[in-house]
Image: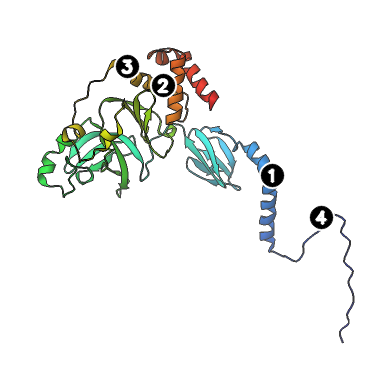
Amino acid sequence: MFKVTSYIAPRIDSLSELKLESARNHPDVEDDIDAEMRELEGEGADEDEEGFGENKIASPGEAITSAAAFMRGHGTYVEDGQVIASVTGTVERVNKLVSVRALRSRYNPEVGDLIVARITEVGPRRWKVDANSRQDAVLMLSSINLPGGVQRRKLESDELQMRNFFQEGDLLVAEVQAFFADGAMSLHTRSLKYGKLRNGHLVCVPPTLVRRLKSHFHALPCGVDIILGLNGYIWISKHVETHMQEGEEGFDAEGVYSDVNEEIDAPTRTAIALVSNVITALARHSVPLTDSIIAEAYNAAVELELGVKDLLEDTEAGDRVVGMVVGHA
């Protein structure tokens, strides 16, 4: 026979005394759950203790955190149960992944990136291009627009005229289209905004300082156009009207592939030089570069009545400009 007895539940005065016994787990799983709970409770303290909540600078060989709690990312390696930095840079954390972004490194390309580059060699049906990366990029003859904007198959006659389009030393703005098997970039200039660059000045900065923006073509209020290449090459030139850039009836062969610079007046030359020196001063202090920051730094230099050479010859002048920009940010 079955005997039924009543069970009186114990009195619980506080939630801390409540223990849920219905959900039972394997001891190993139970330990993992307890570890996760302890980590969640002390997550804020751990971030402050490890320095993940701020831009911590790590040097090669420096221990960052425990390898048991985090996974290693780029710029790190594991040794003796610790995640060690292999490069000098800022420590970044995404969930459990810890990586170190190098302060100075070569450009790491991605498909769709807009870059400013220089032709280094003319080959059969292709140009070799310096893009500030680990390998030279390649611009195929089939990846450019022909004069007149005619969309047709490239012929042998076009190959004979390749130096009329681009030759050694020419600067161009292009887009990363794909990658070859060896990791080299394949570029293209099949856009009215892309192609040979003229009437300006090139500034080189660390690629990590150039932020990814919705557009990398900007017109500053001072009458200067800038192209922020993600590879660290920035092109500064005199302002060109939008309708002149777009062109409604195809290409002007002399304008697109011409090597002759237009006449630039003295005020525009001064503005180009001042913008160039402002960018150099910002890069010297590792300030991320965007069009708004560059324009604000230019206005600060004008407000302080600094000359073109003052930002380079007088270090304190550049420090004051950067201080005004960072203080407003």
User: Foreground: 55 or 64?
Assistant: 55
Give the residue number, with chain letter if any, for mark 4.
15
- Marks 2 & 4, CB-CB < 8 Å contact: no
Q: Which residue is mark 2?
A: 278
**Amino acid at dot 2:** Val
Q: Earlier in the sequence, mark 2 or mark 4?
A: 4
The foreground one among 87 and 125 is 125
On the image, the x and y values in percent for residue 4 come to 88, 80
Picture mark count: 4
Q: Nearer the viewer, mark 1 or mark 4?
A: 4
- For the residues carrying marks 1 and 3, which lies nearer the camera in this image? 3
Give the label, 2 or 4, closer to the camera: 2
Above or below 325: residue 15: below
Distance from Cα at disc 1 to Cα at disc 3: 59 Å
Q: Nearer the viewer, residue 195 or 32?
A: 195
**Secondary element type, mark 4:** helix
The residue beneath circle 3 is 267
Q: Residue 162's x, y, as percent?
A: 15, 38
Q: Which mark is residue 287?
A: none
Instruction: Tell me the residue at 38%/37% (across/down).
Output: 107
